[in-house]
Amino acid sequence: MSESPVTLSAIRATRRILEGRIHRTQILSSATAATVAGRARGVRLADDRLYLKAEHLQKTGSFKARAALARIDSLPPDERRRGAITISAGNAGQAYAWAAREARVPMTVVMPEGADASKVAACLGYGAEVTLHGTHVGESLEYLHRVREERGLTLVHPYDDPEVLLGNGSCGLEILEDLPDVDVVVVAVGGGGLIGGVTVALRESRPRVRVYGVEPEGSDALHLAVAAGAPVPLTPRSIADGLNAPSAGRLATSIARHYLEDVLLLPDAAILAGLRFSVERLKQVVEPAGAAALAAVLTGAVPLRNGDRVCVILSGGNVAPERLGELLAGTVQLGATP
């Protein structure tokens, strides 16, 4: 991976820039989750605990604050004056809106028409201009390019940009500092910005760590990209709107093919089961995307060995109370793009 701009040394440098400006999220643990996960695989986890990196408690409610701050910091003065634009189902938009406000950079966020109302409100609350266009992120992307060209805005990509992966890689460094003997790390995947940065940080620091990606069956961008050797366009369809990317990033695809153990696919029903477990047993409110990695471990989808020390990333917690109630009650249609 020496030809890639996403290196361990670059992640460490970016982490120093972010220090004190984002939360250093804690590692939670659960004996109950370890019991459920161990039973599903017929193993016993190290310490009789399952560890959880609490990125749902990060600034703006998801890991994306790391990436957004790193990317906005990289903008030259002329681009800062003209402003930036991004596309998002919600979490990246919130993170960029927050980071841009901190840097006094005008920010435009393009979101699908069905975007979660609470995520739209959060983007507006951070001071961004929000445009709702298209029935899914792919249609929104076409509109974004027209607006960007017309207004001379700089595209700050939600997941396929070196600075984005470098910022997200700081999460991996924190995991290693708190769990130096970690064996398995499980990461939910949308476009691949989180798993790309985290995987480089982990594998170049501790090569024996096994990293697994988790995607919904109806939104399998990285799974398709790894198989094809390049990003594959798709129309994502999952209740986990934070994972509905129109394709995987090229950077993440390359990293996954080099370093990743596997990309596992879960049905929406399993993801909702993970969400319910998080709320009822862990007392942690996460969104469906934030529950996917946990669900994969609890349902036995992740290959585990006896004595493994396992950490899952709870990647986001941006879900409106009324929607959370619908999800827990099972009244939301599975496989639907909200």
Image (cartoon, rainbow, N blue to C red):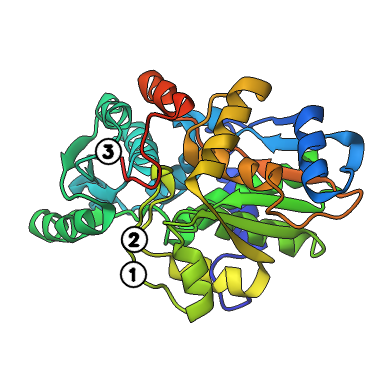
| Observer-nearest of 200 and 33 | 33
Q: Quadrant of the C terminus?
A: top left
Position above or below: 125 against 302: above
Residue toward you, 57 or 151 = 57
Q: Is residue 327 left or right of residue 78?
A: right
Place of residue 232 in the rendered image (x, y in percent of width and height, measured from the top left): 39, 73
Residue 218 sits in quarter: bottom left
**Pointer 2: what residue?**
246
Real-space Cα separation, disc 2 to disc 3, in angstroms? 15 Å
Q: CA distance from mark 3 to mark 1?
A: 20 Å
Compared with residue 200, is residue 108 higher up or lower down, i.e. above or below?
above
Q: Residue at x 30, y 27 (%)?
A: 126
Look at label 3 and name its amino acid. Ala
Residue 168 locus on image (x, y percent): 55, 49
Q: Could you tell which of marks 3 and 1 lies nearer the N-terminus?
A: 3
Residue underneath mark 1: 233
Task: Residue under label 3, please give it.
Answer: 115
